[in-house]
Image (spheres, grey):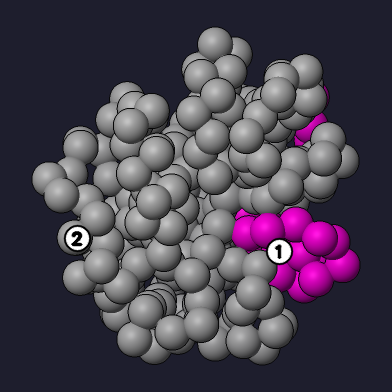
Amino acid sequence: MTKIFAHRGSAGTHPENTMIAFYEAERVGADGIELDVQLSKDGQIVVIHDETIDRTTDGTGWVKDFTYRELQQFNAVYKFADQYDVCRIPLLEEVLAWICSTTLLLNIELKNSLIAYETLEQKVIDMIRHYGLEDRIILSSFNHNSMALCRSLAPNIETALLYMESLYDPWKYVRVMRADGLHPYHRTVTEPFVRQARHYQIAIRPFTINQEPLMEKMFQYGVDAIFTDYPRNAKNIRENKKTP
Ligand code: G3P
Ligand code: MG
């Protein structure tokens, strides 16, 4: 059955990449959570999508220029200020500590395309190992060099390649990259593509699937998982469908 990953938590209804968005994902019965990580000035792994804090908090500036303590001063309530009071930018560690008490899967997207964050891969892997979560985590990135590095640093943690445009001979590429999955922009996903992926035993998890007809289509194709800002809607649709 196609799994449902809450994208940035339940980002359609709660402030993205915050603990309340993650709690909500669990509450509505998502199978997993997707979140994005960057490094603060003092080398802490923080959960935030953009390289700057401008869009999702009441501050401005680069994540890399603030210590974690400084980042804590900003309110990450984003566009949900009328519903929630103060939300902090979480540490990856807080999320992992909490995930241990759940059965959720977790996709950690390394946001290291614009800024290389030299030590990010090793730090993330060390933290996953510290919590013994190797079996429940998928690492992904648009930076495929970073995924190659993760694969060599931690052969037992799943890796997946994010991309926007369709790839030429993706199956050969995945083999060369020694990746376990592809996380494509949904427009590139067709039924034959999903069939081939199954043949090659490559997991396909398209993003970001928010419209209900698109959810239906992806469930019908039998993708391994979808990323959605609306996990509750996706669950309702999946439960009324016969999925492969
Ligand atoms: O990991 C899937 C999706 O999150 C990738 O795009 O920009 O939402 O991080 P973005
Ligand atoms: Mg992401």
Which residue is rendered at x = 49% and y = 70% of the image? 158
Beta carbon of the mark 2 residue lies under 8 A of ligand 1: no
**Dividing the picture into quarters, in which one does residue 181 lie?**
bottom left
**Mark 1 to mark 2: distance in Å?**
32 Å
Identify the secondary structure beneath mark 1.
helix
Question: Would you say residue 206 is visible in this rendering?
Answer: yes
Is 224 left or right of 200, judged from the image as shown?
right
Residue 210 placed where, x, y %?
55, 22
Which residue is rendered at x = 56% and y = 42% of the image? 225
**Dividing the picture into quarters, in which one does residue 207 lie?**
top left
Residue extent of the magenta highlight: 83-106
Quadrant (top left/top right/bottom left/bottom right) for the N terminus: top right
Residue closer to the observer: 195 or 101: 195
Q: Amino acid at mark 2?
A: Tyr
Q: Amino acid at mark 1?
A: Val
Residue that badge 2 annotates? 173
Is 145 left or right of 201, judged from the image as shown?
left
Is 96 left or right of 173, judged from the image as shown?
right
Residue that badge 1 annotates? 95
Residue closer to the observer: 56 or 3: 3
Residue closer to the observer: 105 or 54: 105
Which residue is rendered at x = 62% and y = 39% of the image? 2
Q: Nearer the viewer, mark 1 or mark 2?
A: 2
Identify the secondary structure beneath mark 2.
helix
User: Label 2: how many residues lie within 10 Å, few (<14), some (14-19) or many (20+)?
Assistant: few
Quick one: which residue is furthest to the top in this view?
213
Magenta stretch holds residue 220: no
Please determine whether, in this image, residue 81 is positioned above or below residue 67. above
Residue 213 placed where, x, y %?
54, 11
User: Label 1: how many residues lie within 10 Å, few (<14), some (14-19) or many (20+)?
Assistant: some
Is 199 left or right of 223, judged from the image as shown?
left
In primary-sequence order, the first of circles 1 and 2 is: 1
